[in-house]
Structure formats: structure tokens, C-alpha cells
Image (cartoon, grey):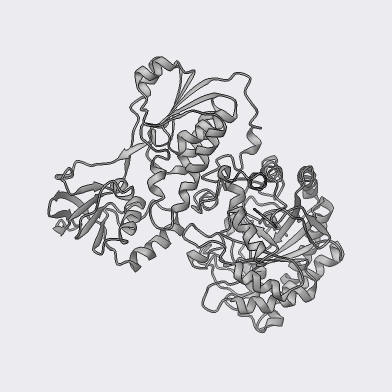
Amino acid sequence: MMTKLFTPAKIGTCEIPNRLIVPAMVMNLCTEDGMITERYIRYIEEKAKGGWGMIITEDYAVNENAKGYKYIPGLYNDEQIAGNKQLTETVHKYASKLFCQMYHPGRQSKHDVNGNVQPVAPSAIKDPFCMDLPREITVEEIHQIVKDFGSTARRAKESGFDGIEIHAAHGYLISEFLSPFTNKRVDEYGGCFENRTRILDEIYAEIRRNVGKDFPVQVRISANEYLLGGRTEADTYELVRHLDELGVDAIHISNGMYASPVLRQIIAPMYTEHAFNMDTAQQVKKLVSCPVIVTNRINDPKMADTILEMGKADFIGMGRGSLADPHLPNKAKEGKFENIRYCIGCLQGCEAGLLAGTCATCLVNPRVAREYENPMEKTAAPKKVLVAGGGPAGLIAAETAALLGHKVTVYEASSHLGGQFRSAAYPPGKGELSTFTSSLRKSLADLQVPVKLNCPVTEELIAAEKPDAVILATGAKPLMPPIRGIDSANVVTAEDVLLGKVDVKPGPVVVCGGGEVGGETAHFLTQSCQDITVLEMRDEILMDMFPLMRMQLMQYIRECGIKVRTKATVTSIDENGVSFKNPDGSVETLPAATVVSAFGYKAYNPLEEIARKHCENVQVIGCAVKAGNALTAIREGYEAALAL
């Protein structure tokens, strides 16, 4: 039973219908000149439909050069008001409240996204992520930025927003002034606490002059930057007392900046423990009279309710949780916890797209940022659809097709759903991946989609079923290159090791292949093996992983004592060990009681030609086309259903 999550509470004069908040997240869905798009509106509207108490928009630029990403919104001129009025009017059709977050990125920006100007910062210290050397901002420029915040706030109020969030967290400009890690100034904006907070004080006062004393204004801060010489909780406790005295309407507790370590990043990966900011938020709550919002690595509504019940915060922010399932609040309120599509902390959609300069998406929810494309209405011409394969691509294709009104049946050759996603949940820190397959299984059951396990698709089955459409999602098989001895009795596949289908013998283990699968399998084996070596023919290992995840797994590999040999080409395997060639042509042999084959995967598509003999509408998706990652496979599953 949940006691607090769906009770209303106020931030300033604004009553929020429940305690679930969508924090600001960069999506990159607007125009280069900061204008609102239909795509952006529909993306936010989906969350309002889903029942979130308050939605905080992504960081609005306060001037045309105050951008950390190329396609974020702005309210730095009056022409931008009309689009934002359309946004607020859309959200206000539902119960949700909408706050406008405004910011200046400071050093966390680059020429190519910021109007081709050099980033500014309190001090000329380069951000290790953006890598553009900023120049030290002048006092006159500070005064202008203060005015920019005020005029942007005025436009936000005119646009119909319910409140404003000042972004003073995550290593952006205001945060940079607050932190001695990035602020080395010796003028009135640097040095002691009073000087470092001066810009925030002035911005808050200017915003109040523009919106009045009764319009809600909250502040987001990083509780700890986790950097040598950066802000800590002790600094935060001093700051929140100051903010409370200023009269802010709420304080939003987050953490970190771009330079922070992986486990304490502003967008925490799956390796990070849940709700790690909650104890700091609880201490802040004891010090201030205004409400406290806590965020980062909270994606379970029952966990959120428990945090509220313990008095650790007044509101719970679930950014990535709202991407994974915009309808999480409504599902939780109805007790449909098994149906929630939980965030798995993979960062592959929400972060990787932004790094590539495009928009954010979500691995477990391919509809994110594509809501504007179609309303998911039932088709007037339902088809009988056969889906071959119960991995992520096939399951998403089946779910989407069923939601559109098609009559779908899923056939899976093995005894389990999930495909490679099932074994992917076994390495340490990745258990949440299983929630994705589990929620899809429940969704298909609710949609009355038959799922037939231990039922490989054959030509006879296709001929008997006479489907109108066939979606082939047969996935990939482990790659076993033509290496002498690869069929030896001591050679096992990484997938079989992870799933417990084989027992690893006592003695040295050699993992052949240093990609994500090989690295994670080696890490998994450290629970029971002490002597593990990874062989990789390329210059480095884990090159197919998202950079932040790679950095953390590399650290775990070093800490666990796993030996790594790169530029090593495996030449042969026997019952005693593995031989490999070095770049200089010399050959070495490592002893191995067990050899783990982690050379990768190859597409498995045995049915296309057969299916086309019996059905005109045949689509091949996911790893059956090309062995790759789940993000691509799931997107293709979604698109295949739309194309029926």
C-alpha cells in the first residue's frame, strides 16, 4: 500500500496533485533558434497524460549563446512565447503542473552548439567532457546574464508556466560560481561563500522583480560534486539555509557535474545504487521550511513512496523513469506495477543520442520523442501477424502491433523469453535488465497475445497459420570463428557461462574476446574464479560500450585483478590452453582449464526465404539482420509493427 505518493502538496502557491516529478532532461527536440516544436510538445504531453504531478522542462537558454546543446528551447526573445503558450495550454488539459527550468551552461558547452562563441565560466578551466577552453566571464557580462534570467522568467510567466526552476546544479554556470572546484576568482564573485553565492542571489532577486513574490521559484543544486576540492554535503547544508532565508519555494537535490566520477554522474548508470541522494535530502529537509525534491536512480514508485514515508523528501524526481514509461504514475496508482516499463540505467538512448548530436530516446521505450508521429490508434484493417522470436525486438514488435489492433502470435524456439537480453542481466550490476522482458511478458498477456515457447517456426507452421504478415526476429548466434581447437571440450560460450548451462572448471580461465560480452563475462566470473585473462585482438577492450559504462567496467576489471592482453590474435586452442599471436609475430600460450568464447555474435536468419514463399508481407528485424545492440533492435521492432 502506498501512503504518500498520490497525495497533493504545494510548492509555493502551486498545488501539485501528487509527489511524482519529472526533472529537466535534455532531449534536443526544438529548433536551433530555441523555438518550440510540435515534437517537443507531444513528448511532454505524453507525460501529462501519464499522470505526473509536475513536469520540469529541460534547461531553457536565457540568451542565444547560453546553450549546452544545439536544439534546446529558449525564452530569450518575445517570439518564443507563442510556442510556449501552446505547450502550457496543452499540459494544462491534464492535471499536471509545468515548471520552466532556466540555465546558462557556462563551461559545459562547445562552440558548435553555442552560436560559435567561446564558452564563459567563472574561471578559465576546461571541462574534461566538452573540452572547449572557456574564458573568464567579466563582471559586466555577469550583470547582463542576471538581467537575462529576469527577462526569461517574465516570458515564462507570460507563457503560462506554473513556476520556475533555477538550475544551479550539475556544473553549469551558477553551479560553477558556487563551487571552489571551478571558481578561482578573487573579485566580488569569488572566494568566500557570500561572494560565490552572489550571482545566484542576484539572479533570484531579478527573477522576483519580474514575476512577483507569489510566483513559485525553486532552485536545483548538486548536493555533492564528488571531486577533490568540489562542493560537499557540508557546503550544501550551508547553501540551503541561505536559500531558505532568501525565500525560495522549493529546493531540488541532485548531484555531480560532467567532471564527476561515473557512479556519481548527474545521470547515474545501472551500476549506481538506488536513491543515493535521499539521506542528504533528509538532512536538507530538517534545515529548511520549504519542500525538498530528491532525484537520481529512483525508478520504482513503491521505493518513492517509502522515501516519502521515511520523511527524506517531499517530492520524488524520476527523470529517466519517465522516459522508460511516461504512464508510470497512472499504472502505479492503479496497482499495475508489473506493467511498468522500468528504467534500466543503460544510458544507451537518453545519453548516447545526445553525444551523437541528435535527440535523446530510450532503449526500453522506442516511442520516446516520436509521439508526434502517430497517435497509436487502432487500425481499421487488422492483420494476422506471426512474430518469430521472443527477444526484445520480437516482443516490442508484438506489443506494438497488438496495441494497434492486429491479431498477433509470438513463437519462441527456446523455453524462455528475452533472447540475449536474458543473459545480459546476469553480470554484476545489470539485474534490472530482466524487468524489461518481464514487463513485456505481462503486457502481452494483458493484450491476449498468445506466446508459444519451445515452438520454433517452421515452413509447415507458416503454411498452416497463413499469416497476413510475418516479423522475423530470430536474433543472433554466438560467433565461432574457424580457429583450430575451438570445438575442444574445454571451450564454452559466454552466454552459456552466464546462464549457468556450463560449469567453469577450477583453474585458469581465458576469455577470448574483449568486447562488452567478454568483459562482462570476465567480471561475472570473478565471483568464483581467481585467475582470469581477457584476450582482445584490437588495441583496447570494451570498445563497443557506451563510454561512461565502459569507464566503470574498466575500473571493476582493474580492481578485480583480471589480466588483459590486447593486440592478441588467437591462433589455436587445446585442452591445455590458448595460443595467440602478438603484433611482432611471436606466439604465446596461456594455460586454461576453461576457454570462454566471446568473439561476438552473427545474425541468424534461417526463415526469410521460407516465409516469403507463403506471405508477401515479411520483415526481418534486429539481430536477425545484423548482430548489434538492443537499442537498434527494439527500435526496429517498433517500426516493423507501425509498417504493417
Relative depth, front residue between 580 and 199: 580
Residue at horizontal 79%, vertical 42%? 93
Residue at horizontal 57%, vertical 31%? 447
- Across the whole image, how many numbered discs are drawn on residues? 0
The answer to whether residue 262 is above or below residue 598 is below
Residue 511: x percent and y percent?
A: 25, 54
The answer to whether residue 427 is above or below residue 381 is below
Report which quarter residue 111 is drawn in: bottom right
Query: Is residue 147 in view?
Result: yes
Relative depth, front residue between 474 and 115: 474
Report which quarter residue 411 is drawn in: top left
Which residue appears farthest toward the front when viewing the image? Answer: 1
Is residue 130 left or right of 546 when viewed as pictured?
right
Report which quarter residue 555 is drawn in: bottom left
Is residue 197 left or right of 467 when viewed as pictured?
right
Relative depth, front residue between 20 and 574: 20
Residue at horizontal 60%, vertical 80%? 184
Residue 148: x percent and y percent?
A: 76, 63
Residue 226: x percent and y percent?
A: 53, 72
Residue 346: x percent and y percent?
A: 49, 52
Query: Is residue 188 in view?
Result: no
Relative depth, front residue between 506 and 86: 506
The answer to whether residue 523 is above or below residue 404 is below
Is residue 488 left or right of 425 when viewed as pictured?
left
Is residue 596 left or right of 161 when viewed as pictured?
left
